[in-house]
Image (cartoon, coloured by chain):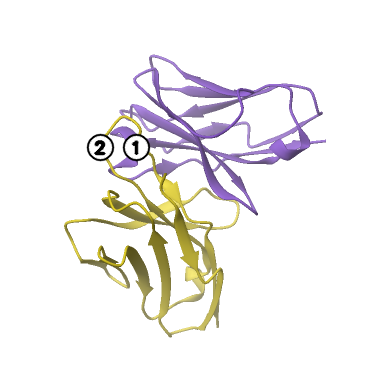
Amino acid sequence: KAGVTQTPRYLIKTRGQQVTLSCSPISGHRSVSWYQQTPGQGLQFLFEYFSETQRNKGNFPGRFSGRQFSNSRSEMNVSTLELGDSALYLCASSLVAQGAGGYTFGSGTRLTVV
Amino acid sequence: GENVEQHPSTLSVQEGDSAVIKCTYSDSASNYFPWYKQELGKGPQLIIDIRSNVGEKKDQRIAVTLNKTAKHFSLHITETQPEDSAVYFCAASFSTGANSKLTFGKGITLSVRP
């Protein structure tokens, strides 16, 4: 079966711009979680959506937001980009909430803010 | 909230030797402990997981042990091969409750010398 698909793979944006990242989970998975990965901080939890509802949120500013559609696809948006937002953004899907049965990660979107 | 720490941050072993990666967690309510492997340019991949009602789990060359009293769990890789070289992440969560989330350690880079 198809894995988790994240688009785009790479993105370069200028400070102050906004960006939208997309994630298509494995068919049948209703939970989508987003993580930010940086060399110094590892994997930091952004938020989780389950059946179109945000179920949990990490400690990120309000510039980071997300949503989930009825087909379980999810998008995350970052507004007013800062240099420190440069990171690999990973999406993970799972059958049940919070990856209790194990996450399947996508390959990520590499965001560079210049 | 939960805090997960991994030690050491890097590990180098000779091909054929065993590798042990240790993690500690802070929240005694955590009951689910997965391990992920991340290869260059890819998202993390679940390789093994353990729940708090089990002390040890094996899958071919890899095994995970859990010590709930000491709040630590370890990944054991036997007969290491060059393709085991990657970044390994441990994680912990309590898999019930509206605010549960998977918290990751910062990762360890394993290098297997041929």
Colour displayed for chain B in the image of the structure: yellow
Q: Which residue is mark 1?
A: B100
- For this orientation, the residue located farthest to the top is A70
Give the numbered dot on residue B96. Answer: 2
Q: Distance between the Cα atoms at labels 1 and 2?
A: 6 Å
Q: Position of residue A46 (x, y in %)?
A: 52, 34
Left or right: where A82 falls relative to B9: right
Q: Residues within 10 Å of mark 2 (few under 14, many from 20)?
A: some
Helix, strand or loop at label 2? It is loop
Q: Quadrant of residue A102?
A: top left
| Residue A97 in view, yes or no | yes
- Residue B79: where, in percent of width, then height? 38, 81
User: Which of these two is toward me, B84 or A32?
Assistant: A32
Q: Position of residue B57 (x, y in %)?
A: 23, 65
Disc 1 residue type (three-letter): Ser
Q: Secondary structure at mark 1?
A: loop
